[in-house]
Image: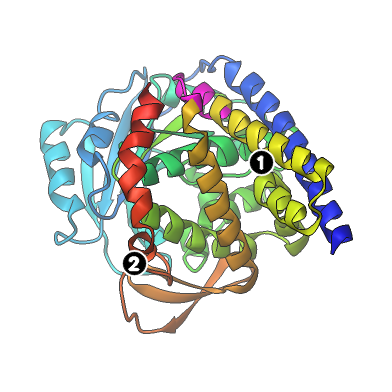
């Protein structure tokens, strides 16, 4: 057991070192100025909506008057008038009729509900440059111009953006936003800069209609849960084209999420991620969560050296996360909120272990089995709603909610 502990402690050191390199690459990457295009093609922004996301009305408003010399529209997709997002979308269309259009979903082509919306939205789009943008995303002023400039570069056929987080008022929302900045955004940049295999994240994904048609349209990924990852890979492999990772971050708006919501969503995401990548890659990603590795290593090998390693990881990992969070938001992260990172990493370690074994998710009321490549197969009729097949976690952690206000106060300090 002591040998296993030593291996885990060494893995934790390797993980912290890798995270430091990833952070350095990200800080350097986002310092690059946004590009300015020589041409200004028409753009259709596709926003699939489902439910009343945190601050949804403000999110939609932020896309109404983006500075762009060419024409652009925002296509809002909603499944039905019964969806809570429907009246908010209608209000946006009434307020900005020159910019916004509302498209109701007609039928279902597959098991992925987001793709079911995108199919009809793409058909209704007036322009050939399509930008998929999640409903909880806000973007900087140069966003559309930067996309057009990247897609004008030789060989580039897809653009994605690093994702930060903003708006948190609860502990669960803060956990989500810190994770996006410290893990997702840095991972996107490192995959591009080191591995030359950029990760396409559907929170912001731009591509040409003609390329989408060559790949079979959104219909071709209608039974794939990680449709963004699949399309990015196919653009590289089948079209032999490049995927650009912009230097401009976009921001995920999470305001009032609970800790349970964060945990359940990442349980689902762990299953998606495990089936979308190879098993060795998934195992290797455990290095990027070094604190739990160091804790287990110390438990198996309780020496002074192990204690020192654990202490270093417990300080350096929150420091790296805080810098990433601040750089992508252009705001400070309170050093007194280190406990947020420790909690986040503990929960994410549990979800990572869950992803090793689980192959089912419940998403928007549909119980699905996820196979290799994140392909979806219906498992049974839904028995409950939710976004994971693990529920009730927030009720099991009442103390976390009791301390949320204090943590948020520390963050704003």
Q: Within the magenta stretch, is there residue 73?
A: no
Report whether 218 appears left or right of 307: left
Residue 118 can be seen, yes or no: no
Where residue 132 appears, as percent x and y from the top left, is 42, 43
Q: Residue at x 51, y 15 (%)?
A: 36
Q: Residue at x 28, y 28 (%)?
A: 62
How crowded pointer 1 is (Cα within 10 Å; few <14, some 14-19, many 20+) is rated as: many
Q: Say whether marks 2 and 1 touch (CB < 8 Å).
A: no
Task: Say which quadrant the N terminus sits in.
Answer: bottom right
Of the residues under marks 2 and 1, which one precedes in the sequence? 1
Label 2 SS = loop
Q: Residue at x 43, y 70 (%)?
A: 390
Question: Which of 45/348 is in front?
Answer: 348
Report whether 71 appears left or right of 23: left
Residue to which mark 1 is pinned: 198
- Marks 2 and 1, how far apart in space? 30 Å
Where residue 266 appears, as percent x and y from the top left, is 49, 57
Residue 14 numbered mark, or none: none
Q: Would you place residue 301 above or below residue 68 in this image? A: below
Q: Quadrant of residue 197?
A: top right
How crowded pointer 2 is (Cα within 10 Å; few <14, some 14-19, many 20+) is rated as: some
Where residue 19 appears, as percent x and y from the top left, is 70, 35
Q: Would you place residue 32 above or below residue 187 in this image? A: above
- What's the magenta region? 324-335
Label 1 SS = loop
Q: Within the magenta stretch, is there residue 329?
A: yes
Question: Which of 233/345 is in front?
Answer: 345
Residue to which mark 2 is pinned: 386
Question: Which of 5/270 is in front?
Answer: 5
Q: Residue at x 60, y 28 (%)?
A: 319
Task: Say which quadrant the C terminus sits in.
Answer: top left
Question: Which of 188/216 is in front?
Answer: 188
């Amino acid at each position: 057991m002591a040998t296993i502990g030593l291996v885990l402690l060494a893995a934790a050191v390797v993980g912290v070192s890798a995270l430091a390199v990833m952070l350095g690459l990200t800080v350097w990457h986002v310092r690059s100025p946004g590009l300015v295009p020589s041409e200004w093609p028409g753009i259709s922004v596709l926003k699939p909506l489902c439910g009343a996301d945190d601050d949804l009305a403000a999110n939609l408003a932020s896309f109404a008057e983006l500075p762009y010399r060419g024409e652009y529209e925002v296509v809002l997709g909603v499944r039905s008038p019964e969806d809570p997002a429907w009246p908010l979308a209608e209000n946006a269309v009434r307020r900005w009729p020159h910019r916004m259009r509302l498209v109701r979903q007609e039928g279902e082509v597959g098991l992925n509900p987001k793709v079911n919306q995108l199919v009809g939205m793409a058909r209704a789009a007036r322009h050939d440059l399509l930008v998929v943008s999640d409903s909880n995303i806000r973007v900087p002023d140069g966003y559309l111009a930067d996309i057009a400039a990247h897609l004008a570069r030789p060989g580039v056929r897809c653009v994605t953006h690093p994702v930060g987080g903003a708006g948190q008022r609860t502990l669960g929302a803060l956990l989500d936003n810190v994770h996006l900045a410290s893990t997702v955004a840095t991972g996107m940049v490192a995959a591009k800069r080191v591995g030359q295999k950029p990760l396409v994240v559907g929170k912001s994904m731009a591509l040409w209609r003609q390329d989408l048609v060559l790949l079979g349209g959104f219909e071709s990924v209608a039974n794939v849960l990680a449709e963004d990852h699949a399309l990015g890979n196919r653009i590289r492999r089948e079209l032999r084209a490049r995927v650009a990772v912009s230097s401009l971050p976009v921001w995920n708006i999470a305001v009032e999420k609970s800790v349970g919501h964060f945990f359940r969503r990442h349980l689902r995401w762990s299953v998606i991620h495990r089936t979308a990548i190879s098993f060795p890659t998934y195992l290797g990603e455990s290095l990027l969560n070094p604190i739990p590795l160091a804790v287990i290593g110390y438990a198996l090998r309780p020496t002074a050296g192990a204690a020192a390693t654990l202490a270093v990881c417990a300080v350096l990992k929150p420091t790296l996360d805080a810098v990433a969070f601040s750089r992508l938001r252009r705001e400070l992260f309170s050093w007194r909120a280190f406990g947020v990172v420790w909690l986040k990493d503990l929960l994410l370690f549990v979800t990572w272990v869950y992803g090793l074994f689980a192959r089912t998710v419940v998403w928007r009321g549909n119980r699905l089995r996820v196979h290799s490549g994140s392909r979806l197969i219906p498992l049974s009729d839904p028995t409950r709603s939710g976004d994971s097949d693990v529920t009730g976690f927030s009720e099991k952690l009442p103390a976390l909610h009791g301390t949320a206000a204090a943590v948020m106060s520390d963050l704003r300090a």
